[in-house]
Amino acid sequence: MFRDRLPSASEGTDRPTAPFSAADRAAVEPVAALVAVVVVGLALGLYAGALDDAAPDRSRQSADAALDRVERAATVGGVVDPDRLRRVEAPGTATAVELEADGERWLAASGPDAPGPPGVRSPGAVAVAERRVTVRVGPGRNVRGTLRAVVWR
């Protein structure tokens, strides 16, 4: 009976073993490799963008803090007095404070480098925080208005 069997390592073989050729090795098509590199690059770009958006906006926090300080200093009995707004000491950063109520606007700035009015200032260069407040516009006359703090970034 004829049996096929592989020779063991101790037995010698008549045939020399051939080294692997380039055709026997695993390979990736160039188009598939290029697509994989592009997909990984896009994924990293999306991740970096999402990480940047998730980071806290420190300038927004400084605008909120400035607004809190100004509101505490200008408020008497829960009503913002525009006359007290002019005497508010501005925080250390370049800050402008705006109060709008009943068609009037009051401005207070921390110095010459403070952000200008809405039409003048660059939206990309400032952080703005605002809230609705009650404003004293005359003796015994209060209206709703907007108190806004604008901080230069």
Image: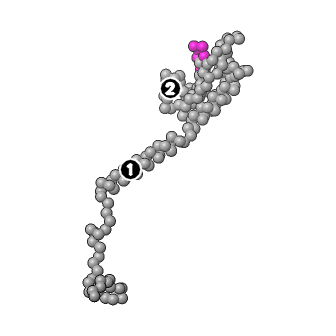
**In the image: residue 50, left or right of residue 24:** right
Please state the horizontal and vertical placement of residue 34, each as a whole percent of the image.
33, 53
Comparing 98 with 52, the one in front is 52
Distance between the Cα atoms at labels 2 and 1? 40 Å
SS for dot 1: helix
Q: Is residue 101 above or below residue 42?
A: above
Please state the horizontal and vertical placement of residue 127, each as a whole percent of the image.
55, 31
Point 40% across, 51% down: residue: 40
Point 60% across, 34% down: residue: 62
Please state the horizontal and vertical placement of residue 60, each as a whole percent of the image.
57, 34
Look at the image and say whether residue 103 sits in the magenta stretch: yes
- Res 39 label: 1
Inspect the image, locate mark 2, and give the three-letter code of the amino acid beneath it: Arg
Discs 2/1, front: 1
**In the image: residue 74, left or right of residue 33:** right
Quarter-of-image position of residue 5: bottom left
**In the image: residue 77, left or right of residue 92:** right
**Dot placed on the residue nearer the N-terminal end, 2 or 1:** 1
The residue that disc 2 covers is: 121
Inspect the image, locate mark 1, and give the three-letter code of the amino acid beneath it: Val
Please, which residue is most extreme toward the right here? 77
How packed mark 1 is, by other alpha carbons closer than 10 Å (few <14, some 14-19, many 20 or more), is few
Range drawn in magenta: 101-107
SS for dot 2: loop
